[in-house]
Amino acid sequence: MPRVRWCCTPSSGCWRESPSASCGSAGSGRPISSAVTVFVCTSCGEADIPGPSAQTGGQRLWIELAARTTNNPDIEVQAVDCLAVCENAVVVAFATPEKWTYVVGGASAAGAAGNGDADDVIAVAAAIGASVHGIPAMKDRPPFFRAGVIARVPPLPQTADT
Ligand code: FES
């Protein structure tokens, strides 16, 4: 089964090509999707109040993000139970088909003191979506993102006929 490869240049960004093609010009490969899914660990973070109605920091951040992106077709927010880096609460991940995935810890939850990092999570999700390869420019990386990146994972190899 033939695979594709990534071609990248500073001026054109990255695009996909078949292994037999040259990396001569951008746009000759298959278009790349830009919708970003933001996974939020809802098990992360301290509960706000004791008792059965308590919400974790991750739950509060997820609720805030979901409310702010309801009408945004470019960002989907999904709750997950755990992203397995629990000591870095609150952990979020930015995933986009055919782009790099970021796992980021240390996001602040929404609470009495404000909206936490919700605005910055949305801003960096938009920057990832706008990036051809899913790697946001340094100027588009808010403080929580710069300080909290745990991992960056490349997109899965794709076959030429998918
Ligand atoms: S509890 Fe949030 S990453 Fe595990």
Image (tube, grey):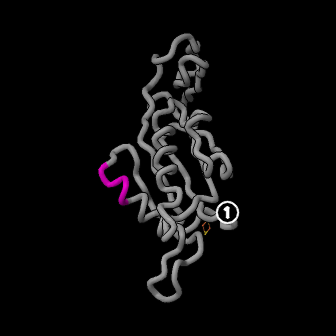
Query: Is 115 above or below relative to 153?
Result: below
Magenta segment main secondary structure: loop
Residue at x-position 65% and y-position 46%: 146
Tell me if residue 39 is in the magenta stretch: no
Q: Find numbered disc 1 in the image and state the secondary structure of the residue it sits on.
A: helix
- Residue 50 position, x and y percent, is 53, 87
Label 1, ligand 1: CB separation under 8 Å: yes
Residue at x-position 56% and y-position 29%: 3
**Image quadrant in which you'd find residue 141:** top right
Answer few, some or many: residues within 10 Å of disc 1's Cα (few below 14, many 20 plus, some between 14 and 19).
some
Query: Is 26 above or below relative to 41?
Result: above
State the extent of the magenta-drawn residues as a range.
67-71
Q: In the image as oriented, which residue stretches furthest toward the front? A: 113
Question: Which residue lies under the disc numbered 1?
Answer: 88
Residue at x-position 37% and y-position 55%: 68
- Residue 83 position, x and y percent, is 60, 62
Which of 116/107 is in front? 116
Q: Is residue 120 left or right of residue 88?
A: left
Residue at x-position 56% and y-position 57%: 92
**Image quadrant in which you'd find residue 108:** bottom right
